[in-house]
Amino acid sequence: MTAPAFALAVGTLRTADATRTTVTATGEIDVTNAADFIRSVEDIPAPRPLIVDLSNLHYLDSAGFAALDQLLGRRAIVIVLDPDSPVRAAAALMGLPVTTASTPRSPRPPEHPHRLTRRWSPRTRAATVPGRPAWPG
């Protein structure tokens, strides 16, 4: 058995109404460790639902989504994701009920200066790169 490729950090969120337990997941959740992830979350001694922040995950495969679905079905967790999280788009496609983190974890990387743009030149019939002449057609 391989070591888990994820880590969980447990914290506390205090509001005027209640104190909630937060869990921040980092790393990867896939078929090799999805059962370990479920077990690790279930073993946290705190009232449910836990607030699980997945914003720092780098990878989540179908087994990871199935693990989240099981935990959601048991009303054991509430998922929080940063808008810039690498798994945000996949979570939206899977229809997971996700709460957006209030502040982004990291700024978006600057746009690469040589990235192709969607500008189309009918004269040359080619996409153009800012600051460079159009490619021959």
Image: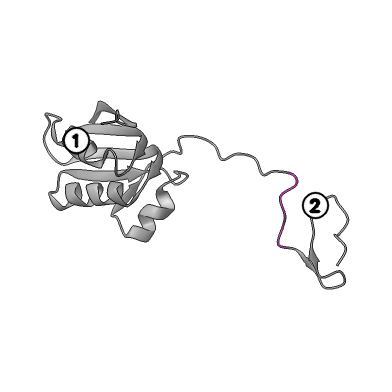
| Residue type at tag 2 | Pro
Q: Between residues 75 and 137, which one lies in front from this camera angle?
A: 137
Q: Residue 61: in sight, yes or no?
A: yes
x then y, percent, for residue 69:
22, 52
50 w.r.t. 119: above or below: above
Point 31% across, 60% down: residue? 95
Q: Residue 15: in sight, yes or no?
A: no
| Residue type at tag 1 | Val
From the image, give the main secondary structure of the stretch colored magenta.
Answer: loop
x then y, percent, for residue 18:
16, 34
47 w.r.t. 115: above or below: above
* Marks 2 and 1 close (CB-CB < 8 Å): no
Helix, strand or loop at disc 2? loop
Point 16% across, 36% down: residue? 39
Q: Quadrant of residue 111?
A: top right
Q: Which mark is residue 70?
A: none
Real-space Cα separation, disc 2 to disc 1, in angstroms:
48 Å
Q: Between residues 41 and 53, which one lies in front from this camera angle?
A: 41
Left or right: 89 in relation to 71: right
Q: Quadrant of residue 56?
A: top left
Q: Which residue range is magenta in the image? A: 113-118
Is 115 one of the magenta-colored residues? yes
Disc 2 marks which residue?
A: 130
Which one is earlier in the sequence, the residue at label 2 or at label 1?
Answer: 1
x then y, percent, for residue 76:
15, 43
Disc 1 marks which residue?
A: 41
Instruction: Quarter of the image for the N terminus: give it.
Output: top left
Is 86 one of the magenta-colored residues? no
